[in-house]
Amino acid sequence: MAVDTGLFVVITLVYLVIVIGLGYLGYRRTKGDDDYMVAGRKIHPVVLALSYGATFISTSAIIGFGGVAAQLGMGMIWLTVLNIGLGIFIAFVVFGKRTRKIGSKLRAVTFPDLMGKCYGSPFMQYAAGLVIVLGMPLYTAAILIGGAQFITSTLQIPYNTSLIAFAAIVALYVVLGGLIAVMYTDALQGAIMFVGMTILLVLTYIQLGGVIEAHNALAAMSDLVPQALAAGGMTGWASMPALGSSIWLTMVTTLVLGVGIGVLAQPQLVVRFMTVRDSRALNRAVLVGGPFILMMTGVAFTVGALTNVYFYRTKGMIALAAATEGNVDTIIPNFINASMPDLFVVIFMLALLAAAMSTLSSLFHVMGTSLGFDVMRRAGSKGAMMRPIQVATVAMIVVSVILAFVMPGSIIARATAMFMGLCASAFLPAYAHAMYSSKPSLLAAKLSLVAGAVTWFLWTAFVHVKESAALGLSNLIFGVPAILPAPWQDVDPLVIALPLSLVVLLAGLALDRHRAPLEESAGAA
Amino acid sequence: MFGIPDPAIWVGYLLALGFTLACLVYGLLNWNNGVEGEEDGG
C-alpha cells in the first residue's frame, strides 16, 4: 500500500507509546490474581463496551469480510444484524448479566473456570480449557498473519520481522499487565477504530454521489456479475443470492450464522462480563456496544459492496477484478488507497493496526489463562496463579507465532469462522444451561460438549469441502475431498454441530431426570 | 428503499439499525438499574 510512510511511522510511534503507557498503567494496577485474570471486577462500562467490541472485531472482520462483501454483495448486512442483535443485545442482556452474577458469586476467573464451578466438575473446566488451548492458537495465528501482512505491505518491513515484532509488542503488555492492560489498550484501539470507520463511511458516500445515488449505481451493476459467481447463485451486489444456491449457503450458513451465532460462546468475550462490578455497568455498555458494532461491520460490509461502483467508474472493472492477484483481502486497502485523502489513509491504517492488536491481546490472555490456570493448575499445583499464567502465556504466544509461520496466508477469514463455529458447537448449549438452570445437569453438559466438538470436527474434516479438501483427511481415508455431495458440502459445520449439541443436551437432561427417581428409589430400598 | 431494490437487503439494514436503536434505548432506560445489592436475581 503506497502511503506517506513517514507520516504513518510517526503516528504509529505515538500510538505505540500511548499503548505501552496504558499497558504500564495496567501493570501498576495489577496487584493480585483477580486483577490479572478479571481486571479486579471493577472495569468502567465504556471501557468494557469498547474492549468487547474491539476484541470482537479483528482486522479480518474489516478487511477480510469487507472483501467478501465486495465479492458477494450487501447480503453480508445480515451478519451485522446478528452481530448487534445476538453479539451485543442478547450477549449482554441475556448471558452477560447471569455470567457476571454467577461468576462473581463463584469467584470464577476464566470461562473454563466458570463452567467447572457451575457444574462442580473439574472435567468441564479441563475440557473447556483444552478446547481453547488446542483450537485458539489457529485463530490467533490467523490474526498474527493478518497483522504481519498488513505491517509488511504498509511499512515495507520484512514479513518475518513484522510478525515477530507485532507479537512481541502485544505480548509485552499482555504478559506484564494482564486483563487490565488488555482492556485499557482495547478501549483506546476501539475508539480509533470507531473514528476510522465513521470517516470511511462518510467519505465513501461523498465520493459516490450520496446514499441513494451510490445504491442505485450498485443495483444497476447486476449484469456485471462474473459468470462463475452467477452460476453459483449470485444475482447482484444489492440483492441476496438465489435461495438455496451454493453462494447463498456459504453466505448464510458459514458467514452469517457461523460467525453471528459463534460469538455468543467466545471465551475471550464471555470473560469480559466478569470484569464489571454490577449489572448497571452491563446496561450502560449495551448503549455503547450497539452503535460501535454497527459502525464496524455495518460500514465494512456496505463500503465493501460499494467499492464495485468506485472501481467500475474509475477503472471500468468490478472490485474483484481490481483485487491484487484476485485476493479479496486487498480490495478494501486498494479502495482506501486509491480513493481517500492521504491523511485518512494513515488514520485508517492505524485503525486496522488497532483492530489487530486488540483482538490479539485478548487471545493471548485467554490462551495463557486457559493453559496456566485451567489445564495445568488442574493437574496439581496450587497457590499464587499469576507467575505460572505469565509463563503459560509466553508459551502459548510462542506456539501461535510458530503456527503463523507455517500456516498459509489466505486462511485469515476461514480460521476466524472455524474457531467461532467450534466454540459455539462445543460450549453454547452447556454455557446457556449453566447460566439458566438452578441445578444444571453435569451429564447433559458433558455429552453436549463432547458431541458438539466431535461433530464439528468430523463435519469439518470430512464434509465441508472448503476445509476437508485443505485438511486432506477425507482424501487420505476415503479417496474423495468430501464424503457427502452438494448441497451438504457447502453447509457450515456449525449448522449441524450446534443443533446436535443442543439435542444431546436435552437428551442428557431427560436421561438425568429419568435416572434421579430410580436412584432415589434404590436409595430408599 | 434507499436505492436498494431487494427487500431481503433493505430489511437487513432496517433490522441492523433497529437493533442498534434497541441497544441505545435499553441502555438509556436501564442506565441506573442493576446496582449491586439492588438486583432482583437476574
Image (spheres, rainbow, N blue to C red):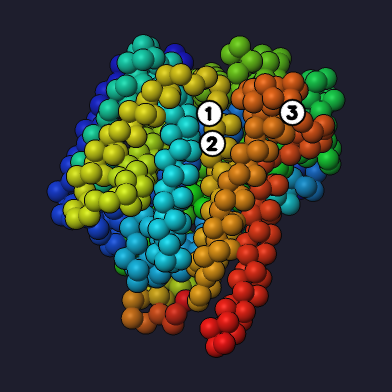
Helix, strand or loop at mark 1: helix
- The chain to which mark 1 is attached is A
Q: Is residue A521 left or right of residue A288?
A: right
SS at badge 3: loop
- Give x and y (percent) for residue A265: 52, 53
Q: In this view, does A337 lie to the left or right of A518?
A: left
Residue A482: image tag: 3
Residue A382, percent from left and from top: 22, 55
Measure the C-alpha gap from mark 3 to mark 2: 21 Å
| Quarter occupied by residue A270 | bottom left
Real-space CA distance between mark 1 and mark 3, rounded to the nearest whole angstrom: 22 Å
Identify the image quadrant of the C terminus of chain A: bottom right
Mark 3 and mark 2 lie on one chain; the one further toward the N terminus is: 2
On screen, residue A286 above or below A489: below
Discs 3/2, front: 3
Determine the residue located farthest toward the front in the rendered image. A525
Q: Mark 2 falls within which chain?
A: A
Q: Say whether marks 2 and 1 touch (CB < 8 Å).
A: yes
Instruction: Give me the disc on residue A416.
Output: 2
